[in-house]
């Protein structure tokens, strides 16, 4: 069955497909901060490309003399762009999980195409994760960016792909194995958005999903604001704020003291960041808790007992200390019976891409949307 929230464009004349040996399938998690690419041939279960890539494009400005940048290239991507940031204009084209800068996004996707198919000889079919409840306009913008780069695409909500990627296919026959695709609630905390989704064995419908634009980047902003209130003369860079968050993030009661040494204008200072970090992270947890309750109410009543045993947190925000235990504690205090909340672990960056290529290998021909140049 074609998902209701996917648009398939029918054409009066189907282009002649390339041979299956020339078809490559791509699972793509196009993230605000980091993208993950997983690719392999259509007629094999092996992966030929597996790469995590910072979602950034670096453009060379006017006036750079020869020999400063590698190969005197005019454009750089990912880690290489960051390494040469002093001499580049860096653009992060994905904002809040969707296309924010169409030109830079297209340049980034062309680069990804080159990683997957360096010789440009294959038909590329890509399953791409999108935020839960992404607007029709956001989807059309994404398709427009992919046109002329990929041949066919399928857009699927990221939490569903995360569940599919988290699924251990080898254990499906085990009696006690809890299949995350069968009946679960996924909380995907990214950089731009937090997406929640009821996963019940089929592509989720709009009512199965909740998405809001508070996530990792919003926590950065709140931490910066909180620190400035305590240290009004201190101006930390975005990178310093992110490092503080990734090192110290937590939810629950205050964990004072947390002292952090920072370098400002060449001078080393020690600042106390416990409440600045904790208050920001707890604000996100408040929203997640209320959204989880809303989705539980939308689930069929006879499925809720099993659903409560399978609440999973993924994305970068799953690394916030205590986020699983605190969410579980709040659900217990609310009266829900024996909820079980867990994080998916350190490999969270890969699960959407793994789920995407699984979906690509399972997709029927009429589910692919053809992109016409």
Image: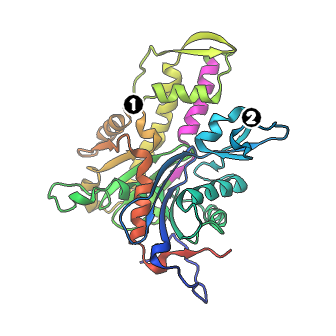
Q: Does the rendering let one see residue 197?
A: no
Q: Is residue 220 magenta?
A: yes
Number of labels in the image equals 2
Q: Is 67 situated above or below 373?
A: above
Neighbour tally class for label 2: few under 14, some 14-19, many 20 plus, Cα within 10 Å: few
Q: Secondary structure at mark 2?
A: loop
- Precedes in sequence: disc 1 or disc 2: 2
Image quarter where the N terminus lies is: bottom left
Task: Please identify the quarter of the rendering in which residue 338 is found.
Answer: top left
Q: Tag on residue 68?
A: 2
Is residue 297 rendered to the left or right of residue 132?
A: left
| Residue 178 image point, x, y percent | 23, 55
> Residue 299's quadrant in the figure?
bottom left
Is 164 rendered above or below residue 230?
A: below
Q: Bounds of the magenta span?
A: 211-229
What percent of the width, then of the height, locates residue 234?
A: 67, 16
In magenta stretch: residue 271: no
* Residue sitting nearer the eye, 110 or 263: 110
- In this view, 177 is above or below 60: below
Closer to the camera: disc 1 or disc 2?
A: 2
């Amino acid at each position: 069955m074609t998902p209701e929230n996917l648009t398939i464009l029918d054409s009066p004349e189907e282009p002649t497909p390339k041979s299956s040996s020339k078809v490559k399938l791509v699972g793509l998690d196009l993230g605000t901060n980091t993208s993950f690419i997983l690719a392999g041939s259509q007629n094999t279960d092996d992966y030929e490309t597996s790469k995590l890539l910072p979602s950034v494009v670096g453009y060379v400005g006017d006036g750079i003399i020869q020999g400063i940048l590698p190969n005197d290239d005019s454009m750089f991507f990912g880690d290489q762009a960051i390494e040469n940031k002093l001499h580049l204009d860096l653009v992060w084209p994905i904002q809040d999980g969707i296309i924010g800068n169409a030109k830079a996004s297209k340049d980034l996707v062309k680069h990804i195409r080159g990683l997957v198919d360096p010789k440009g000889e294959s038909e590329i079919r890509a399953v791409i994760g999108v935020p839960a409840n992404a607007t029709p306009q956001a989807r059309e913008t994404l398709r427009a960016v992919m046109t002329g780069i990929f041949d066919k695409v399928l857009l699927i909500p990221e939490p569903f792909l995360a569940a599919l990627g988290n699924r251990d296919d080898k254990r499906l026959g085990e009696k006690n194995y809890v299949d995350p695709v069968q009946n679960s609630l996924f909380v995907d905390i990214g950089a731009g958005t937090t997406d929640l989704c009821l996963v019940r064995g089929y592509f989720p419908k709009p009512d199965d999903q909740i998405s809001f634009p508070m996530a990792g980047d919003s926590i950065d902003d709140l931490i910066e604001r909180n620190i400035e209130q305590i240290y009004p003369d201190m101006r930390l860079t975005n990178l310093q704020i992110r490092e503080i968050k990734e090192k110290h993030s937590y939810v629950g009661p205050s964990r004072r003291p947390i002292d952090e040494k920072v370098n400002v204008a060449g001078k080393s200072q020690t600042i106390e960041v416990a409440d600045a970090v904790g208050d920001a992270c707890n604000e996100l947890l408040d929203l997640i808790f209320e959204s989880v309750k809303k989705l539980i109410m939308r689930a069929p009543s006879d499925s809720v007992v099993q659903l409560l045993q399978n609440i999973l947190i993924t994305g970068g925000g799953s690394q916030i200390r205590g986020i699983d235990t605190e969410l579980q504690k709040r659900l217990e205090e609310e009266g829900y019976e024996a909820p079980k909340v867990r994080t998916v672990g350190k490999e969270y960056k890969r699960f959407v891409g793994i789920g995407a290529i699984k979906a690509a290998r399972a997709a029927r021909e009429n589910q692919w949307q053809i992109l016409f140049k």
